[in-house]
């Protein structure tokens, strides 16, 4: 007879608590835990202290020292006669804690409000006390071991403490922990409401996916608000909370999804099929299978041929937020400000969870890393931070980077492991040009079949046009039609508009030739070649412009 043992892997925050427990066992005396949500973090810290053989207590300026159950710590020396909320007195008390081998006294002190007392000129005494304490505690006998955990929403540790404090960025709850929060909120409802409000199967998974990236308190508030307003947990309501987080940080742009998704992108059939296949990696079945989340794609090619539009459309197709990371806008005038802004932006991306992150014209933002720009190494540092993040990140953000000038891209950016695939986006083929015309008409609420527009005739007249140039023909034709008695657009209107365009392929012929030569064999073509275009020599590296 055989038995099967099912083991549950620890959650993200449980793993972090295990690390804290290890630090306490190794007699680390000063930990700086960065977390905005105190209550759930403290629960994990209590468990970490207990596992390491310590008794945990808290301290804040309102209550002073308190036991784990919230009751006041009944020690008359707790503030050296100066009141429970005095930080200097509390640090003195921690230093005075003693135990024996027979009666150990091992304590962890979670100090909530201490960072406020470590700022400004008046902080000198408290800083010195804490610094002395961090030096003093590791030398004490193991039965008198004490440790201080500073709980702060900021990772800005005073310079005086940098060599003494171990900084820990406390992670946000993962899917399992968010699911526990959801169950707790629904479980608190009255019996007659709970049965109708409990999400099941796909609805529960969608609600959890939408809440990943929120703190425990934020997720709880979103679930409760949705239940009160809609009598159900609505992923769209939760997504609005994520949008508020992005606006609050001011480091990323949140783009609302474009209607229609990938159907609004004409052509690029290879790329669109690949993107749609990657969307399945986010399903519960894919997680159970162990399928890794896709990392991203680099789109290079001719300007105006759909790279940026694809980034916007895939977010719609996948039903996830679209975040634009502008590396140039993160640069600051003070030393270290640019690097700090980039780290914060990457942290926000990780906190949002499943999303599409759009890096537009990445070669311009990183030009200084390869061209020797006199920016004090800021571009090189940014490149290093992005490469490390893209290689090691564990989140579900999908990165789409677009580039026009291939020669300026750092080679280390394009290797496997950073992006799943590199795609070459060329001038549209004949069939793509026809589909772009149809998509552009749909964007203006018009159907080419009902209008009897000959999209193939327009495609023939727009050879060597970029996708953007073809799309622009529709509003030009609409102006003509509206001025002629507000009639509907005709094929002739589109052909007339096309005749007035000088395409980019004519003004930048040499540049496009160099791009094709560089990327031949180095990237996957985003489009299946048309037989007519292959015969004409357009897709093999040549560009015949008449």
Image: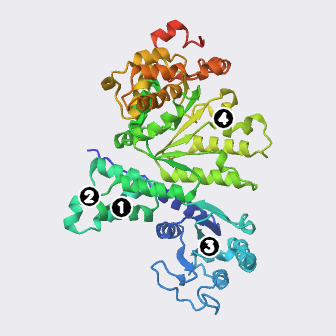
**Mark 3 / mark 1, whichever is N-terminal:** 3
Do labels 1 and 2 touch, CB within 8 Å? no
Q: In this view, does 118 lie to the left or right of 418?
A: right
Most extreme residue toward the front is 485
Q: Where is residue 204 in the image (x, y as percent from the top left)?
A: 31, 52
Most extreme residue toward the top is 535
Number of other residues with Cα within 10 Å of mark 2, as a class: few under 14, some 14 to 19, many 20 or more: some
How far apart are the two marked residues, 3 and 2, measured between alpha carbons? 42 Å
Number of other residues with Cα within 10 Å of mark 4, as a class: few under 14, some 14 to 19, many 20 or more: many
Which scheme is used to colour this image of the protein? rainbow
Do labels 3 and 2 touch, CB within 8 Å? no
Q: Quadrant of residue 393?
A: top right
Q: Which of marks 4 and 1 is in front?
A: 4
**Mark 4 / mark 1, whichever is N-terminal:** 1
Q: Mark 2 points at which residue?
A: 198
Work out whether residue 460 can be spotted: yes
Q: Mark 3 points at which residue?
A: 148
Query: Which residue shows up at 76% across the image and 34% down it?
Result: 371
How far apart are the two marked residues, 3 and 1, measured between alpha carbons? 35 Å
Q: Name the residue under label 1.
A: 223
How far apart are the two marked residues, 1 and 2, measured between alpha carbons? 11 Å
Q: Nearer the viewer, mark 3 or mark 2?
A: 2
Q: Mark 4 points at which residue?
A: 363
Do labels 4 and 2 touch, CB within 8 Å? no
**Mark 4 / mark 2, whichever is N-terminal:** 2
Provide the secondary structure element on which disc 3 rests.
Answer: strand
How far apart are the two marked residues, 4 and 2, measured between alpha carbons? 48 Å
Q: Is residue 289 left or right of residue 54?
A: left
């Amino acid at each position: 007879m055989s038995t099967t043992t099912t083991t549950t892997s620890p959650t993200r925050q449980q793993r972090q608590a295990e690390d804290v427990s290890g630090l306490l066992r190794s007699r680390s005396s000063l930990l700086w835990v960065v977390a905005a949500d105190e209550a759930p973090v403290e629960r994990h810290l209590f468990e970490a202290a207990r596992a390491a053989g310590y008794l945990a207590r808290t301290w804040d300026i309102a209550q002073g020292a308190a036991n784990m159950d919230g009751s006041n710590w009944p020690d008359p020396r707790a503030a050296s006669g100066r009141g429970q909320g005095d930080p200097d007195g509390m640090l003195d008390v921690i230093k005075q804690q003693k135990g024996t081998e027979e009666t150990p006294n091992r304590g962890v002190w979670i100090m909530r409000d201490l960072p406020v007392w470590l700022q400004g000129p008046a902080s000198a005494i408290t800083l010195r006390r804490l610094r002395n304490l961090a030096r003093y505690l590791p030398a004490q006998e193991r039965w008198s071991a004490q440790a201080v955990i500073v709980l702060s929403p900021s990772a800005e540790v005073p310079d005086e403490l940098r060599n003494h404090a171990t900084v820990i960025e406390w992670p946000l709850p993962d899917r399992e922990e968010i699911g526990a929060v959801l169950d707790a909120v629904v479980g608190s409802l009255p019996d007659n409401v709970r049965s109708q409000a409990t999400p099941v199967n796909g609805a529960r998974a969608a609600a959890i996916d939408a809440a990943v990236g929120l703190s425990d308190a934020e997720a709880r508030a979103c679930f409760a608000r949705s239940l009160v307003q809609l009598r159900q947990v609505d992923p769209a309501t939760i997504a609005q909370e994520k949008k508020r987080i992005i606006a609050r940080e001011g480091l990323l742009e949140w783009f609302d999804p474009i209607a229609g998704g990938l159907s609004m992108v004409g052509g690029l059939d290879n790329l669109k099929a690949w993107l749609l296949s990657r969307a399945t990696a986010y399903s519960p079945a894919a997680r159970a299978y162990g399928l890794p989340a896709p990392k991203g794609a680099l789109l290079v090619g001719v300007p105006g041929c759909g790279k940026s539009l694809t980034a916007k459309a895939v977010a719609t197709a996948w039903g996830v937020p679209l975040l634009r990371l502008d590396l140039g806008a993160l640069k600051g005038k003070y030393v270290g400000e640019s690097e700090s802004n980039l780290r914060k932006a990457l942290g926000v991306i990780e906190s949002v969870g499943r999303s599409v992150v759009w890096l537009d014209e990445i070669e311009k933002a990183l030009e200084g890393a390869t061209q020797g720009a006199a920016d004090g190494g800021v571009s090189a540092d940014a490149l290093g931070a992005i490469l490390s993040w893209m290689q090691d990140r564990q989140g579900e953000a999908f990165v789409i980077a677009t580039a026009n000038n291939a020669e300026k891209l750092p080679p280390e950016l394009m290797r496997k492991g950073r992006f799943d695939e590199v795609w070459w986006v060329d001038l549209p083929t004949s069939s793509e040009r026809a589909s772009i015309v149809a998509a552009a008409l749909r964007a203006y609420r018009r159907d080419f079949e009902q209008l009897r527009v000959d999209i193939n005739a327009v495609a023939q007249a727009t050879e060597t046009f970029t996708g953007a140039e073809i799309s622009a023909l529709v509003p030009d034709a609409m102006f003509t039609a509206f001025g002629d008695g507000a009639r509907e657009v005709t094929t002739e209107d589109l052909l007339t508009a096309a005749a007035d365009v000088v395409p980019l392929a004519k003004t930048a012929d040499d540049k496009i030739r160099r791009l094709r030569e560089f990327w031949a064999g180095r990237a996957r073509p985003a489009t299946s070649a048309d037989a007519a275009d292959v015969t004409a020599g357009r897709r093999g590296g040549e560009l015949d412009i008449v």
